[in-house]
Image (cartoon, grey):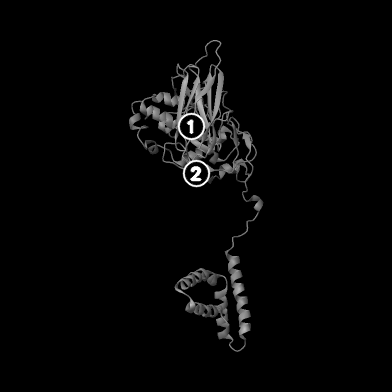
Amino acid sequence: MPITRAVVSRLRVAWASASTFGRGALLVATAAVAPFYLVLGPLWFDMAYAGLRVAAPARLSDRGRAVLSAGVAALIVGVLLVSSSPASPIGSGQSGSPVAAASVPAAGGPSLPLSETGPSVPATAALKSPAVSPTDSSSSDSDDDPGASIPPALSAPPVIPGATLPPSGVLPGEPNPVLTPGSLNPAVTQTTIQSTICTSGWTATIRPPSSYTTELKIEQMAQYGYSDRSTADYEEDHLISLELGGNPTDPKNLWPEPYAAFLPDGRPTGARTKDAFETELKNKVCSGTITLAEGQREIGDRWVHYYYGITVTSGPVPTSGSTAAATAPPPAATLPPGAILSVSITSLPGSVSPGANATMTAQTLAGASCTAKVTYHSGTVSGASGLAGARVAPSTGKLTWTWKVGSTTGAGTSTALVTCTLGGQVASDTQTFAVT
């Protein structure tokens, strides 16, 4: 007997004896079962049963029709399942399984992590056939360039002719000043800043296309001798940012800046840190706190030194064309004879709520250059603008930082670190507080 006829017969009996609520339940159950009827066999059984009854009414008994119909339904369902399943991967050993991150010293630069995914390919082949890999893009004045992603070689490449080692004194995150000395945009001067860099959206009108910066990034990665050849690990950055009057297209002002770079004590010096410093300096220039020339000097090839208040000992300053900038770094502060540098966090709230402001005060010697770092319970280092940059202690030696705790910051014990330098001495102090 066909399944449909049997089900309908039973439904009629149940419907006749059911209450209003029971009939609603029957309708819901019927609607829920209908997809299984259409896909998993009953429909095919009924169609085969009806066809056999028409084609061979006298040759097959009802039981014979039922057996053959069940076989036809099972065959059709099996074919549908096999045809709809995804193809099995071939060569699973090369399916792009993650590889352990490794750190290989880049020639002329800090140790950088290799990409955590992707097969190993020869460096020369990777350079010829980059595969585009989209990344975050923003309408802000950040110099982030999506670029292309090249699978990294898992061993250091051979020495590249033309790669130049940077001079001593270059910190992780800073460019090789021989390869990337910086270059200025002649349209941006102290008298034109309000109509150029201080006008919202102006940098978008001069930003070079990604087709240009991606090709340049691949070429400069070879010049820098990076062992990690994944372009996704670098930002083709303007050394003198566009928002501080940098030249938009001059290769001397563009370089493959690593996202992952750190000082020996763990402080970040990668592209995202520089982006935040650029915005901070631009705001100071546009508000008149510092001059354009001062902002350009601090964001130049010694930007990490200026960001963290580390004494600049040597090295060229940014140039515009062939003319070197005439402003030299300020002289370093010195310790009084016999003095020993110290720093103490004198005020820090015991607990802070996510989304609230927090204030920290530290006491040190006058003239000391100090930085503040907050590490939350999750291990995330705060990128709040109130903690950015180095600050020089006034005659009282008292420094204060106020920052906003992110609204999504998780609860737990966090650590505040203040590090000060003066006259070649370094001192630091840490305290903990709770995010509740």
Toward the viewer: 273 or 358? 358
* Dot 1: element: helix
Quadrant position of the N terminus in the picture: bottom right
Residue 415 in percent (x, y) is at: 54, 31
Any mark on residue 135, and which? 2
Disc 1 packing (10 Å; few <14; some 14–19; many ≥20): many
Residue 423 in percent (x, y) is at: 54, 16
Q: Is residue 249 left or right of residue 412?
A: left
Q: Quadrant of residue 402?
A: top left
Q: Give, as a three-letter code, the residue at label 2.
A: Thr
User: Label 1, on which residue?
Assistant: 274
Residue found farthest to the top:
337
Between the C-alphas of marks 2 and 1, the distance is 18 Å
Q: In which quarter of the image is residue 165?
A: top right
Quick check: can you spot residue 433?
yes
Residue at position x 60%, y 78% from top? Answer: 69
